[in-house]
Amino acid sequence: MFDSKIYTDRRNRLKKDVGSGLILILGNPEASYNYPANTYHFRQDSSFLYFFGLDSPDLAGVMDVDNDKDYIFGDNVDLDDIIWMGPQPLMSERAAKAGIHFTEPLKSLPKLINEAKARGRKIHFLPPYRGESFISLENLLGIPISEIRNQASEALIKGVIKLRSVKDRHEIAEIEKAVDIAWEMHTTSMRMSYPGRIEREIAGAIEGISLAKGGPVSFPIILSIHGETLHNHHHGNVLKEGRMMVTDAGAETTMHYASDITRTVPVGGKFNQKQKDIYEIVLEANMKTIEATQPGISNQKLHLMAATIITDGLKNLGLMKGNTADAVNEGAHAMFFPHGLGHMMGLDVHDLEGLGENYVGYDDEIKRSTQFGTAFLRLGKKHQPGFVFTIEPGIYFIPALIDKWKGEKKFTNFINYDKVEAYRDFGGIRIEDDILVTDTGYKVLGRPIPKTVAEVEETMADRL
Ligand code: GLY
Ligand code: MN
Ligand code: MN
């Protein structure tokens, strides 16, 4: 945990922002896997971690804004628990580490909520995402499950997003640790990417690095010689010379801060000319948008900058044609780059997305596009110092999408479908880094992970 003052300060700032009422933040319960007692690895809710710090199941945090009093509801362990799980500090001792001096057993929570309800006080809660939390909120608040997400507090959502979006130096240090773990994961993946290996051998090895150095991976590993499938979790292919392999993987630290890095490498360790041509375009889009990052620039603008670089690059190779600005404006590039440039990152790998993507990524000034491709951009708004986000452009040759658009004669003024045919078995390339917005520009977080053609080839030469 961080120092208790950090949690107290975060809660005080949130209470000031929300103004009045009771703020209820549920911690996560255990979640069963294939039978009740066999659970998934426990993961605390990120907002609970941010404001209350305690990393164990079956806790709830309450901030009474009007009376400036914070509580943790949770049970002390009994003898049975001690026999199975070992001794644990008292709840009061644990809560003190988060600067909280009022603890109550979990069964007392309904009383506090009912009293507040009886007085007509507003109870602020966040939109839940786990079935158990929907049920708890229905029981506590008397709101039907189907209504709960609609009745979540907008003031609380906005207050939490405002605070969690701007990372302090302690959080940035944690994220850098997570990227340093990713350095080891990705350089290991590179050094293992030789013909004959099965993808799962590499995926398993790098997941083990995350577990050994920090926490579990920050999301299920994407690792495939079919990188054109954007979130490919199938790890059953045998690596073959001539394919590119995408590894999109990150770690959580023991404090649960994430990294999210993608590298794409030629199986066997040497890029051929065709691979290098496409790779250099993606690399330019990655590096130029990183270099353009500064407070005040919108991420939508960075996204369109990447789309422009990709369109120009594909025009140079003869795969696209026509006026670049028109092509990007109309969305022709999205056949090759059908996703957004990136997203916020922090305690969640797609930070705060559970509170509502448009609250996190957009505002009154910058609205989400409705166009295929750009519409999938999760973060569009202007950057502020302290934001941590990903930059992850890519170029993909997705046969189903090529066939559909070609069949519809879509964008024949911008896409040379005949030339594209020569690439339909190419796969995909994505390059992703984790970026901090500083007062004057940007910082690429963590130990630099090989990414130029020369750096990747040199790393791969040290074969594992
Ligand atoms: N880890 C999936 C992504 O890059 O958004
Ligand atoms: Mn990723
Ligand atoms: Mn990402």
Image (spheres, grey):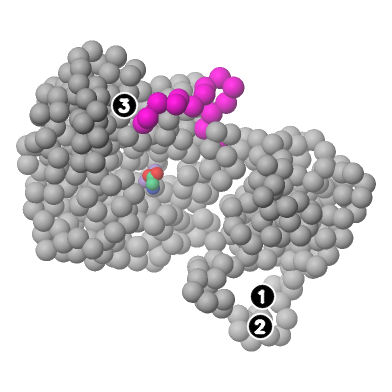
Viewer-closest of 249 and 146: 146
Residue 288 coordinates in the image, percent (x, y)? 30, 26
The reply to whether residue 406 is in sight is: yes
Q: CA distance from mark 1 to mark 2?
A: 7 Å
Would you say 178 lies left or right of 455 here? right
Would you say 38 lies left or right of 24 here? left
Say what amino acid the circle numbered 2 marks. Ile
Label 2: state its secondary structure.
Answer: helix
Label 3: state its secondary structure.
Answer: helix
Q: Which residue is mark 2?
A: 82
Q: Which residue is mark 3?
A: 306
Question: Main structural element of the magenta stretch: helix, strand or loop?
Answer: loop
Q: Which residues are magenta?
A: 360-374
Q: Quarter of the image holding residue 369?
A: top left
Give the vertical position of 236 relative to 87 (above or below). Answer: above
Q: Which mark is residue 88?
A: 1
Is tag 1's residue or tag 2's residue first in the polypeptide sequence?
2
